[in-house]
Image: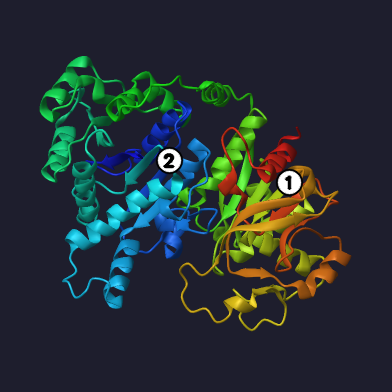
Amino acid sequence: MTKYVFVTGGVVSGLGKGITASSLALLLKSRGYKVFMQKFDPYINVDPGTMNPREHGEVFVTYDGCETDLDLGHYERYIDEELNYTSNITSGKIYKSVIEKERRGEYLGATVQMVPHITNEIKKKVYEAGISSNADIVITEIGGTVGDIESQSFIEALRQIQYELGSTNTFFVHCTLIPFIYGSNELKTKPTQNSVKDLRNMGIRPDALVCRCPFNTSESIKEKISLFCSLPVSNIIDSVDVKNVYEIPINYYNQKIDEIILKQFGLDIRNANLKYWKDLIKTVDNLKDEIEISLVGKYVELHDAYLSVTEALKHAGYKYNTKININYVDSEQLEKEDDLNKIFKNTKGILVPGGFGSRGIEGKIKAINYARTNNIPFLGICLGMQLAAIEFSRNVCGLKDATSTEFIVDTKTPIIDLMADQKEIVNMGGTLRLGNYECKIKKDTLAYNAYKQEKILERHRHRYEFNNKYKNLLEKNGMVFSGINEKSNLVEIIELPNLKHFIACQFHPEFKSRPTRPHPLFDSFIKASTNK
């Protein structure tokens, strides 16, 4: 029978529930158990696909085409497993499903209520994750904090699961805050006590506490929490601030939280294989070199909007023993800048990531032109590829009005255009080209040198495509179309072979990068940027 670990949060948001859930999964996987992960988000949006990245951060895309919360990126990077549609459930998805069932008459005329109809739908999603993944242990993180109005239906559903399955099949980890009060120089446990009290008032007994604190707590602090929260001292885990986020799983391992979970489940405590993770920590802590990479985007006010991109850059840096310092460049501000040498004076590589809409587009094109004309290593992703094609069309092929129908609907030079099957779509959410699509790579190209194989699968999230009407013209002027989706004859990768490193792709390679295994395109980009 699948076992379930639930990670909740209290006091404040931003305590690191996602990293905690990922760390627990990594530890349990290191002991030979098959682990699957899931995130419940209380917001009413069906998924984050229509949400502004400057408000919510990046949209992570699973291989099967689900637009999900960025925490799923943490999950995949830590446990190196591909997640799917069962991994991110929102209130919007739950309500939508229940309302559709009501409209079809599936409730046989019953009055549809939060309990049991909404909570039953939530429980169904929990159990579905266990069945579809065939995992030994499913770890589910609950977004928000205990006490949030929008989270109450999820907490109630988990209370029912705790009652239905019992303590040998469920384990609740509650993340709280132990603040340090300057002046009196004290750690305060009252926020943790009150948070646990709120959770217990909602019917859930936490089995362990993960307490975010600036440094390790004393035994007397833990004994106080143990007394007021009715937990063994051993089940109170310190989550101290660290410089290297990869140390967190090892901190938890040293406090034996994975053993505590396995004992409650009645599962064998197998030897943990963590050498590869400790080697990663050693590498990250002892990087010898450092370089600056400029990321030119339109959502740079919130760095989480490019979280997977920045992580993928760091992963490649680890391979080359190099710390990657990211210079976030606002493409909208770049439009007003005349001296690009000032902006990019220390830059060893330029990356233009994805995005939507016309704002800041000309700034991105200026950055691409600067990279091309100054022979600076360049990597374009999604919109970055489309703009690289537009920049080349304008400044090399002489198509001065080259643009995309996303920016100018009635343009006479649509280098980038909607696919025919996208033109009649009205709804914005969930209608992009999403998830894994196959790409065939041409031999003797930069892309082939990176991947070292002809057929690849990469995750997509876009609506507009390169217009094949202009392909011959760009090829005659030196552009190589090195990656093609043969089924739909769509351009996936472009490159300029006469430069040091200039490559752009329509898909999102950052979603498949791992700390111990950088993505081939990021590997190639950082290798060129470091001259290694």
Q: Relative to the observer, which residue lies in front, 363 or 81?
A: 81
Instruction: Judge depth for marks 1 and 2 and give the one in front.
Output: 2
At numbered mark 1, what does the secondary structure look like: helix, strand or loop? loop
Extreme-right residue of the structure: 476
Q: Quadrant of residue 231?
A: top left
Question: Callout 2, which amino acid?
Answer: Ala
Instruction: Give the residue pinned by disc 1.
Output: 377
Q: Nearer the viewer, residue 266 or 206?
A: 266
Other-residue count near label 1 (Cα within 10 Å), few / some / many at <14 / 14–19 / ≥20: many
Residue 314 position, x and y percent, is 58, 37
Q: Which mark is residue 158?
A: none
Name the residue: 72% across, 41% down.
524
Q: Locate residue 29 relative to residue 331 in the image: left or right.
A: left
Query: Which quadrant of the rendered structure holds the C terminus?
Result: top right
The kind of residue tagged 1 is: Pro
Looking at the image, which residue is at 58% across and 69% down? Answer: 463
Q: Position of residue 245 (x, y in %)?
A: 45, 31
